[in-house]
Structures are given as C-alpha cells and as structure tokens.
Image: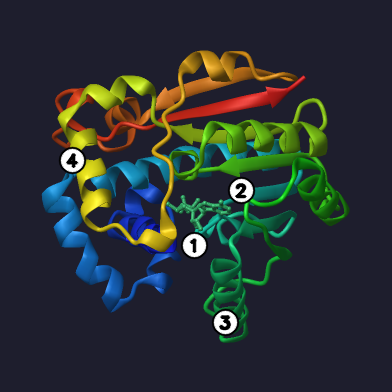
Amino acid sequence: MQIHETAFVVSTYRSYHEDVSKDTYAKLWNNPGTDALIPDILKRVSNHEAMLHSLRNRFFYEKMNSFFDKNNGGTLINFGSGFSMYQFSFDDKVSTIEIDKKDIIDYKKEKIDHWTKEGKLPQRDIQYTAIDFNKNTAEEIVETLRPMIKKEPTFILIEGVFFFLDRKTTNKLFQVFKGIQNPGDVVGAVTYLPEIEKTKVYERLLNYFDSNNDTNDSFSHQTIPHSYFESIDGYVIQENTDEFELSKIYAPNNKINTKNEILNETMYLIEKI
Ligand SMILES: C[S@@+](CC[C@H](N)C(=O)[O-])C[C@H]1O[C@@H](n2cnc3c(N)ncnc32)[C@H](O)[C@@H]1O
C-alpha cells in the first residue's frame, strides 16, 4: 500500500460513520479501488478502524470549530492534509492552507475546484502547497508558509502523519510550527504511544504494511511517548485524549472493551506560549 492510498482509506472510513465523524463531504472521495482495499484491512488488522478514524475526525472538528468560533475565524494549516474536508464544515471566516506531497495536492486541488464549480462544495479560501517533509529544510518550509498566512490565529493540524515520519523529521516540523505560530496558537497532533507496540493489533498492522509493501514508498513506523509532547520547546499541552476515551462519548454503543484490542491513537492539543 502506498502512503497516498492511506489518505483515501481514512477518508472512506469517515464516510462510513458520518454521524460520528461529522464529515458529510468525505464520501466525495470514495472510489472503487479504495472500496476494494478496505474489507481486507478490517479483517486482517481490526474491524474498529473505520470508527476510530471517525472519532479522531470528530475530536478535531469540535476543537477547531470552537477555536475558530472563539477567535472569529483564523487559518487552519493542515500538514499531510490528505483528503480531509474540515474547511467546508467551518464558516467562511476560516482560511485553510493544505500541505501534502505533490501528487495528493495536485489531485485534491483539481477535484475541489471542480466540485466547488458544480456547487457540491461551498466556496472557501483555500491555498495549496506541495511539500515533502523529509526533503525540505525547516527554514524553507517556514519561508514558504509565512507569506501564505493572512488571517490569525492559526490552528495547525497534523493528523495520521507522524506514523509515517522518523523522529528527525518530526523534530523539524515542530521547529517549523514554532517558526510560524504566535502565543495562543494551537497544534493538534495525533500519534501512537510506544505502549501500543506490545499489542497484537499493532503487530497485525505492521504485518499488513509489510505484506503490502511498495518498495518505492517505504516509511517509518513511528510511535512517540507522552514525554515528547511535554517537552516541546515553546509549547505546553492544553489537552490530550485517545480514541478509546472518545468512543465512550461519541459511540457509546460500539463494542470496544479495552484499549489494547484497538489501534488506539492519542490526540494532543498543544498551545504556543
Ligand atoms: C493517513 S494519511 C492522513 C491524511 C489526513 N491528515 C487525514 O487524517 O485524513 C497520511 C498523509 O500524510 C502525507 N504524508 C506522509 N508523508 C509525508 C511527507 N514526507 N511529506 C508530506 N506529506 C506526507 C501523505 O501523503 C498522506 O496524505
């Protein structure tokens, strides 16, 4: 499986549980190729994956919505944005900067422009920039992004991306965040904690990626400890939770008994000081 296919997969997951994810636009990206991949993933890895990704979306939807409400708008800067569609659920005082690899960005821009013309999507202020986080330096990324930020405050989202990056690139991205944000601005981030490495379900996830490996698209399998987020220079943790806890709020009838049986991701909101 190539990394860009993972963006289609998580978008399709969100479309399965619109009531939970609150993403009513995700289904626009559904396609037969992705539909064909998903049953095998749910069977071989975990059948909770679609719900967990919907819960993750719901958490950030709620948090960003109240952040932009409170501040009368601002800019969402989405790192590794894939096919996420938050901007169409917020009002038009929110601008968005979408950052991803070139193939995703080109494809997304073309489709969004087309669907907006057709009236399937509301008009929003969206800028797109193609950046490979492994290749560009922190300074280059900051220089690209700074002039694009026209409305403050900013909410940076990095969701479903750290797993694919190594620690060096992760550190670089936090330097970038510090370089473009002001006090009071927020980063929303998602990670697996290292504890998950002992679980059977995580082993199944790695087996799945290994057996569907595309040699041109190798990636790290990064987990990040809580202590990393506690010691990010220039930031404090505002809030953290995980999908297991979110399931109790937004999907109480879902049968998840313990954290260890699911690919439980942890969400952090950290604030620039
Ligand atoms: C699992 S998808 C998540 C997409 C989106 N954030 C979401 O939650 O729906 C991972 C995304 O990270 C992007 N990505 C992975 N490695 C990257 C890199 N080195 N530079 C830029 N984007 C990267 C992929 O292209 C893909 O869109």
Q: How far apart are the two marked residues, 3 and 1, measured between alpha carbons?
A: 18 Å
Q: Position of residue 72 (x, y in %)?
A: 76, 44
Query: Of circles 3 and 4, which is in front?
Result: 4
| Colouring scheme applied when the structure was drawn | rainbow
Q: Amino acid at mark 2?
A: Asn
Question: Of marks 3 and 4, which one's residue comes earlier in the chain?
Answer: 3
Q: Are marks 4 and 1 in contact (CB under 8 Å)?
A: no
Question: Of marks 1 and 2, which one's residue comes earlier in the chain?
Answer: 1
Q: Position of residue 175 (x, y in %)?
A: 73, 32
Query: Of circles 4 and 2, which is in front?
Result: 2
Q: Are marks 4 and 2 in contact (CB under 8 Å)?
A: no
Q: Which residue is denoted by mark 2 in the rendering?
A: 134
Q: Amino acid at mark 4?
A: Arg
Question: Of marks 3 and 2, which one's residue comes earlier in the chain?
Answer: 3
Neighbourhood count class around disc 2 (C-alpha, 10 Å): few under 14, some 14–19, many 20 upward: few
Q: Is residue 216 visible?
A: yes
Q: Amino acid at mark 3?
A: Gly
Secondary structure of residue under mark 1? loop
Neighbourhood count class around disc 1 (C-alpha, 10 Å): few under 14, some 14–19, many 20 upward: many
Q: How far apart are the two marked residues, 3 and 4, measured between alpha carbons?
A: 42 Å
Question: Of marks 4 and 1, which one's residue comes earlier in the chain?
Answer: 1
Q: Which residue is denoted by mark 4 in the rendering?
A: 204
Identify the residue at horizontal 60%, vertical 19% (top origin).
238
Q: Is mark 2 within 8 Å of ligand 1?
A: yes
Dividing the picture into quarters, in which one does residue 7 lie? bottom left
Q: Are marks 3 and 2 in contact (CB under 8 Å)?
A: no
Q: Which residue is denoted by mark 3 in the rendering?
A: 119
Q: Quadrant of the C terminus?
A: top right
Secondary structure of residue under mark 4? helix
